[in-house]
Image (cartoon, helix red, strand yellow):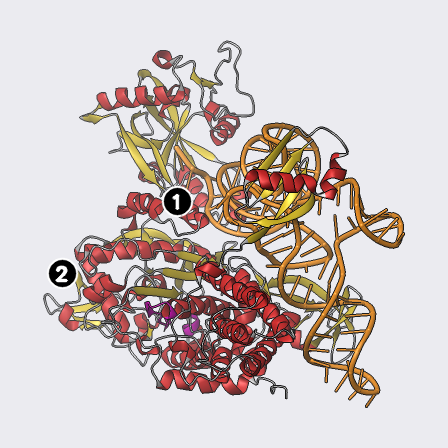
Amino acid sequence: MAAERYNAPAREPHWQKVWEERKVFLTRDDDPRPKYYVLEMFPYPSGRIHMGHVRNYTMGDVLARTKRAQGFNVLHPMGWDAFGLPAENAAMERKTDPGKWTNGNIEVMRRQLKSMGLSIDWSREIATCHVDYYRHQQKLFLDMLKKGLAYRKASRVNWDPVDMTVLANEQVIDGRGWRSSAPIEQRELTQWFFKITAYADELLEALQGLAKWPEKVRLMQANWIGRSEGMLIRWALKGKALPQGHKELEVYTTRPDTLYGASFLAIAPDHPLAKAAAASNRELGAFCDECRRMGTSVADLESAEKKGFDTGILAVHPFDPKWTVPVYVANFILMDYGTGAIFGCPSGDQRDLDFARKYGLPVVPVVMPKGGDAAKFTVGDTAYVDDGVMINSHFLDGLDTLAAFEEVAKRLEGQKLGRKPAGKRTVNFRLRDWGISRQRFWGCPIPVVHCPDCGVVPVPDKQLPVELPDDATFDRPGNPLDRHPSWKHVACPKCAGKAQRETDTMDTFVDSSWYFVRFTAPGAKTATDRKAASDWLPVDQYIGGIEHAILHLLYSRFFTRAMSETKHLDGLKEPFEALFTQGMVNHETYRRTSGNHKGQWLTPAEVRLDTDGTARRAFLIDTGEEVEIGPVEKMSKSKRNTIDPDDIIGRYGADCARWFMLSDSPPERDVQWTEAGVEGAARFMQRVWRLTDEAASRGSPRGSPRPGSFSPAAIELRKAAHKTLDLFWRNVEGLRFNVAVAQLHELANTLQGALASKEAGLEWAIRECGELLVQMLGPMMPHLAEDCWARLGYNTLLADQPWPKPETALLVDDTITIAVQVNGKRRDELTISRSAAKHEIESAALKLESVVRAIEGREVKRIIVVPQRIVNVVA
RNA sequence: GCGGACGUGGUGGAACCGGUAGACACACAGGACUUAAAAUCCUGAGCUGGAGACAGCGUGCGGGUUCGACUCCCGCCGUCCGCACCA
């Protein structure tokens, strides 16, 4: 009698309830077993989970469940990255409250995640928008302020004049606001910053120690931090155009060796000297204004012409008081890199060369390739940017680039301009301090008060938290906190006079920079419980999208250091021991090709697919018209190629979705969601259910004594099972889930073959194989595995079973098959004892008929025998 | 422009340290069961030639190292990603 079909959607809630009731996944801090902290990046509560979440959380869950079975005390928590602009937009559009909207989304998504059967300790759930979380963040901020790690300064920001808020660089697309499409303005605003640059060197250095991070992410961070070694060089200024109080100009360069090739200085339009000079030069002022209006987008920069404006100011060459070069204001100089001023050496830098040609400035070659002829070497349209030998450079002539750098550095450091040395070796970083002020409502309030008499006053600890008001209005753009009738008006904590709260809130990346710490003690009265934090951290395995390679992961690394500095952590520096970045979930796109709706995107549900031989065609179900099958793209609302996890779980079960997400594609690569793939997963589930059923009835009863000896077929079966067990864990540990899945497929095939076999004496091995298969399936398809476990006669929970250990004796074979090559070409294979000596293998190989034929009577020159691997006959 | 990754059957992919390329799955074809279908099970298959045994070719392209290369080295081509007026 065949087993009934397994009804996953009906069974899964049952097991979820059992796990919850028996508190199977609750984590205790006082558990003496070794800890393992596995964390997936927490979701933004946008409304519903998507397939990317399913993939991400399934991977983490496989690790968490396996590690748990292996005897680790596993921490696997979940929370919500719950502040952010979408809640405000929703409030504006739907006349609701951001908090209500967010909490409603959390409800829905929590239910969805629970329906996935994740082994999460839900008692540790946190949401960053809850005051119990952000009150501690305010404390962290104040402590950072005390340490000088948070500070205020005026800076230029992207300002959206329609939404009336600052936008991050990422939110400016082609010079326009991502939401409003309004042209973005550059505004000078006073903002709060975190001093991440104080850790620039350390954040860069420590990347080398992150051995379990993807090389790619480490590289991206290294490039982002952008360390360069160079010099600050001060130039004396003169000329009639020189504004008062500007006697000198400091430039930053990585090529002091090319100093004798200098033909101009250039400064940023926002440079203080430029501003001062513009005050008395209307044309220059107009030029600077024009530069400021220039867009900041990639396209703008690429097409923008390199332009300069001669200020009339002259700079004196550090090595020759009689030599002066003009000072230009140039549109391509960035105020916030280096000193906002450069010296141009046209022969050694392409951009400087273009500039010099345009404005008729001298081009003196100072570096030529090694072995070149100084008399003949010239620079035409292409600058020589590589290292080489110095020429036309007085005392530097003949030195190589590196030596020239050192010589110039030595001389300038010893030479005075005014009272100070004329030059200084320095290290410069691309990394900027982290601007965290946002003119938005739905974020963590920055806990300071502005007092007309006392200035910026931190909110005293006693007065924390600074809570968001619950009666803000969202009927018009701008910051609801700022226009709230009463919220910002408070007494100054210092002088008790009339004062105003800071109305900016923190960037939401602040929230996610320490949530992994909070999970270690989610109910602590202080921000952290240092004991719990040092017991649990660092996170042993962190899993998330590559899109956070820089921002979130760099900020978290900084924050961990800052929290150690402010004593919220016990000296921890790196939060994430191992990082894994998973690929996206993609789907085919479909669109109409004709009629009034040409170009309209169609959802997968609206389309019927037909396979005609190997050609695939798609038809609109409603009308029958053929539609175009477009490229496979990331699931997105705009292309309408999304699949709702709820639908899949409701139809096939969570285990099916989980299994499919783990199958086929390597986890770091994109995976293509296909109906056929899901159905394949569903079929496999039925097959497992059937095989377990047969193994339970055909195999020997549970607990029956192990036979003294096994038949050859039984040994083969046992070997297959134990080898799979061995490989399975190695592949899971290496996060090669797709390979682990393939191994289970293979074992299922083997078990099926054994069940079909008429041979007697397999009962015990069949039973064992079935149980091992179910145990390995457990972390991947936990619900099905529980049912199979019960079908095998157990009344325990599979989730509570220890991980089985492979019998090492079964992992090695007595006889092995090795390939036999003739002249590097495979001709045959040889089955021989594992311990066979070289000469035995050699003579056996030479006797093979196909080898003899391939040699064709030629003389055997050499035979390479690699025991247990290969034989290669060279003839 | 700079930096990086990748390129294997019809498709997704596997191959640990240089040692039998194509595991496993999807799709496909043939067969069994069935009145039929679904479900399930069995079989086949890199390409070319051959009835077949077998032979030749084959991991983007061209070279190289090696007894032996998907794997290492050099040079191209293509795709994707990150950064980008960084002095």
In which quadrant of the rendered view does residue A9 lie? bottom right
In which quadrant of the rendered view does residue A416 lie? top left
Front one among A168 and A92: A168
Q: Is residue A352 above or below residue A848?
A: above
The residue to which callout 1 is attached is A222
Residue shown at the point (14%, 61%) measured from the top left = A453
- Identified by mark 2, the residue type is Cys
Q: Secondary structure at mark 1?
A: helix
Front one among A727 and A85: A727
Q: Residue A748, position in %: x, y?
A: 58, 70
- Please tell me which of labels 1 and 2 falls first in the chain: 1
Q: Residue A654, position in %: x, y?
A: 52, 77
Q: Are marks 1 and 2 in contact (CB under 8 Å)?
A: no
Q: Residue A612, position in %: x, y?
A: 80, 68
Q: Chain of mark 2?
A: A
Q: Quadrant of the N terminus of chain A?
A: bottom right
Q: Quadrant of the C terminus of chain A?
A: top right
Magenta stretch bounds: A69-88
Q: Chain of mark 1?
A: A
Q: Is residue A853 left or right of residue A160?
A: right
Magenta includes A84?
Answer: yes
Distance from the alpha carbon under mark 1 to that under mark 2: 41 Å
Confirm whether circles 1 and 2 share one chain: yes
Q: Residue furthest front?
A: A708
Label disc, if present, on residue A193 of the rendered structure: none
Q: Nearer the viewer, mark 1 or mark 2?
A: 1
Q: Is any atom of residue A435 visible in this view?
A: no
- Identified by mark 1, the residue type is Ala
Front one among A549 and A744: A744
Q: Is residue A853 left or right of residue A250?
A: right
Q: Is residue A517 above or below residue A149?
A: below
The residue to which callout 2 is attached is A454
